[in-house]
Amino acid sequence: PRHLLSMADLDAGAIRTILDTATQMQDVQRREVKKIPTLRGRTIINLFFEDSTRTRSSFEIAGKWMSADTINITGKGSSASKGESLRDTVRTIDAMGVDALVIRHGASGAAHQVAGWVDAHVINAGDGTHEHPTQALLDAYTMEQRLGSLEGKHVAIVGDLTHSRVVRSNLISLRRLGADVTLVAPPTLMPSGIGAWSAAEGFTLSHDLDAVLGGKGSGEAARPVDALMMLRVQKERMSGGFFPTAREYTVGYGLTRDRLNRLCDANPEIVICHPGPMNRGLEISADAADAAQSLVLDQVSAGVAVRMSVLYHLLAGEESPTESGATSEG
Ligand code: CP
């Protein structure tokens, strides 16, 4: 596709291609090669209207390691703070002749709108509570590295489903890669309409984390869990307050030390993911975040290789991903 706006833009074959190229890119990441010339002469703008540590910096690193010129613009430092509209902002940047816009915005659907306004390739780096496709790609990449093929694996995604853009992208991605998915959340953080969506996409819903982790759920949720993805409680998107309370949430849905111990006793091979940033002590304990089973920093590392792969497939044309004059100098 010309843009990456949703995981729905990628069929299973396209996901496989991006993950395979990411493997080559991670070889670059591991070797002493500092830069490859694949995107020399291309200009990538990171346009972030919401804060970010991982996504913005990894897109910037990915572009720089491929010799692109990368520029960061944030909402607060741009003329958006003077009232310039999103349409005028992106058309202004596009008029300078950039090749790609990586956009994060608080409004669901913003990336799709931007793609209709500009000539540049658009990559959705998170739009409101809608999607975060490169997060789902790096999650799949990280889990595959530890678990092998995700075909037939059972992934439980736990937490604030109402406000999560990560869950929607992961559901599409994981189902297309053949994984069985169980979503677990308190009733107050389960999006309305998710039942119909579940019927369409084929995943299981539960409000009972301990039943799912103990293999005592119903349907697919009755199977042992191979990977557990904890989601951040997004308090900043909860204008009406947070229910359950933080204490109740941790008791019912947090990956506490006790739950971690029970899980690891039952299956020492289980992997734990979290997209970050983490609320340590709320949805995930420090013991779990730092456990040998935690892939949190592997996810961060994979983010660079996967975003290199995405940029390559959108921007590089016929160039080979890692050849043609790689240099060991910056
Ligand atoms: N996971 C994620 O998108 O993190 P950042 O908000 O730090 O980019």
Image (cartoon, rainbow, N blue to C red):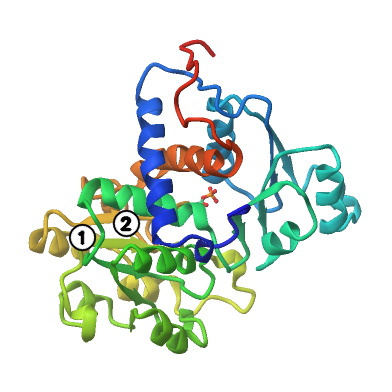
The residue that mark 1 highlights is 260
Q: Nearer the viewer, residue 53 or 322?
A: 322
Kind of residue indicated by mark 1: Leu
Q: Position of residue 273 (x, y in %)?
A: 33, 55
What kind of element bears circle 1? helix
Whether 77 is drawn above or below 257: the answer is above
Residue drawn at (22%, 64%) of the image: 153
Residue drawn at (41%, 63%) of the image: 173
213 left or right of 205 in image: left
163 left or right of 305 in image: right
Whether 298 is drawn above or below 213: the answer is above
| Crowd rating for badge 1 (residues with CA inside 10 Å; few <14, some 14–19, many 20+) | many
Q: Nearer the viewer, residue 266 or 87?
A: 87
51 left or right of 114 in image: left
Kind of residue indicated by mark 2: Ser
What kind of element bears circle 2? loop
Residue 288 visible in the picture:
yes
| Crowd rating for badge 2 (residues with CA inside 10 Å; few <14, some 14–19, many 20+) | many
Q: Earlier in the sequence, mark 1 or mark 2?
A: 1
Whether 21 is drawn above or below 113: the answer is above
Label 1 or label 2, whichever lies nearer to me, is: 1
Q: Mark 2 and mark 1 in contact (Cβ < 8 Å)?
A: yes
Q: Position of residue 102 (x, y in %)?
A: 65, 47
Q: Nearer the viewer, residue 121 or 280?
A: 121
Whether 135 is drawn above or below 191: the answer is above
Quarter placement of the N terminus? bottom right
Tell me which corner region of the image, top left, top right, bottom left or bottom right, holds residue 281.
Answer: bottom left
Tell me which corner region of the image, top left, top right, bottom left or bottom right, holds residue 217.
Answer: bottom left
The residue that mark 2 highlights is 285
Q: Hey, which residue is sitting farthest front in the picture?
A: 318
